[in-house]
Image (tube, grey):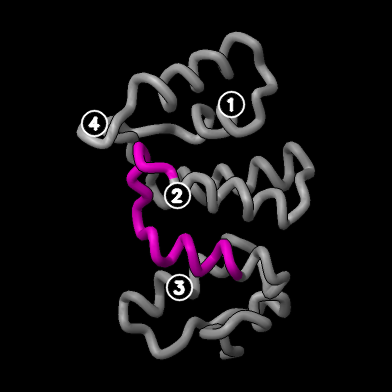
Amino acid sequence: MIGLDTNILVRYLTQDDPIQSAKATEIIERRLNEENPGFVSTVAMVETVWVLDRGYRLAANEIAAAVERMLQTDVLVVENEQEVFTAMIALKEGQGSFADAMIAALAARAGCSCTLTFDQKALRLSGFTLP
């Protein structure tokens, strides 16, 4: 297994740099396979979504589609895949940010009864409550 940093994922998804995007495509489409997959950590996934949102100004549905493609790719192993899927659905349905949804999903997975927050937007997501 080979770990993939955020910049590899962003270059592959955006195809915005002729040299780096070509290298990222080569890695993901030709070098990786089911026997030697790429590992996408939770941190890399959250960073990727943040960069697509803040840096590239993509719409939530475009970002959700990119996350969904990564989840469906046989040559990628996504850490906390179910929680990433849950966060992708929340983003797609306009319930809250991907990062907030990941925080709630990971807390629930860890057995937390709730996640305390002062963030009014996060309160729209299941699992968050005011202190």
The furthest residue to the top: 19
Image vertical order of residue 12 relative to residue 108, above or below: above
The three-letter amino acid code for the residue at tag 1 is Arg
Quarter of the image for residue 17 reads: top right
Q: How far apart are labels 1 and 3 at the CA level?
A: 27 Å
- Marks 1, 3: nearer the viewer: 1
Label 1 neighbourhood size at 10 Å, few (<14), some (14-19), many (20+)?
Answer: many
Kindly identify which residue carries mark 4. Answer: 36
Q: How far apart are labels 4 and 2 at the CA level?
A: 16 Å
Q: Residue 84's x, y, as percent? A: 47, 60
Image vertical order of residue 94 relative to residue 116, above or below: above
Q: Quadrant of the C terminus?
A: bottom right
Badge 2 marks a residue whose secondary structure is helix
Image vertical order of residue 12 relative to residue 88, above or below: above
Q: Quadrant of the N terminus?
A: top left
Label 2 neighbourhood size at 10 Å, few (<14), some (14-19), many (20+)?
Answer: few
Q: Residue 82's x, y, as percent? A: 40, 65
Q: How far apart are labels 1 and 2 at the CA level?
A: 18 Å
Kindly identify which residue carries mark 3. Answer: 105
Kindly identify which residue carries mark 2. Answer: 72
